[in-house]
Image: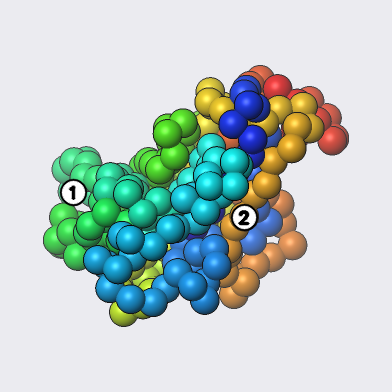
Amino acid sequence: MSTRFTSPRLRGKERPWRIAAASLLGAITLCVGSLFGGTIAAQALTPLPCDIYGSAGTSCVAAYSSVRALYKGYSGPLYQVQRASDNATSSVSVLAAGGYANAAGQDSFCAGTSCRITVIFDQSPQHNDLTIEPAGVQGPANVGAIANALPTTVAGHAVYGIFLPPQTGYRRSATSGIAVNGQPETMYEVASGTNVNNGCCTDFGNVETQEVDTGASHMARP
């Protein structure tokens, strides 16, 4: 799970989010101790991370999770998978508003073949959805994460995190509501520390609008 939250007045392109760790675990969320208990119905009544930030005047401008809603009222898709057998796609949504991912639906859709994640949906009103990273000056286009590569269980719910080995990445260059040029923003991510190396990097998030390497320390420039 990952979220970005900033002052609603900030607009523009988002800086890149480089992840040195090779795997992204989408199963753990913010405020772990207070968010994981109870039933789905109870969760729908409990403020979730982006509700909390919004109430403090620092609304989420990008909110991604493959395992759960980040708003108590969110009932939409979390991510899209594409199966290898016929290239058909299906969106994996939450079981109920404010709840966990319908991983069983993914299992049914992908039965007998393999699936990759092709879109990670932004739950925020900004709709900064992420797609597979295209080719750039530093290398060829990436591939989507294998959809069932990182199974885990959260509060009794079987769900899938997002595994990002080399050549797997997601980004978005045309964004809405994101801080630019060093304007204030906060990012929170929970990642697995069990699969790491000394290499760099995997793209996850948004990038400079030029999508080229403009030199060191330029990652926050549009």
Other-residue count near label 2 (Cα within 10 Å), few / some / many at <14 / 14–19 / ≥20: few
Whole-percent x and y of residue 164? Answer: 51, 56
Indicate whether 156 appears above or below 122: below
Decide if residue 114 is in sight here.
no
- Note whether 163 is above or below 93 in the view shown: below
Q: Amino acid at mark 2?
A: Tyr
- Indicate the position of residue 195 as horizontal and vertical percent values: 59, 70
Gap in angstroms between the C-alphas marked 2 and 1: 36 Å
Q: Quadrant of the C terminus?
A: top right
Mark 1: secondary structure:
loop
Tell me which corner region of the image, top left, top right, bottom left or bottom right, holds residue 106: bottom left
Q: Nearer the viewer, residue 162 or 186?
A: 186
**Residue receiving disc 2:** 188
Q: Which residue is mark 1?
A: 85
Residue type, numbered disc 1: Ser
Q: Earlier in the sequence, mark 2 or mark 1?
A: 1
Q: Residues within 10 Å of mark 1 (few under 14, many from 20)?
A: few
State the residue at coordinates (39%, 77%).
Answer: 37
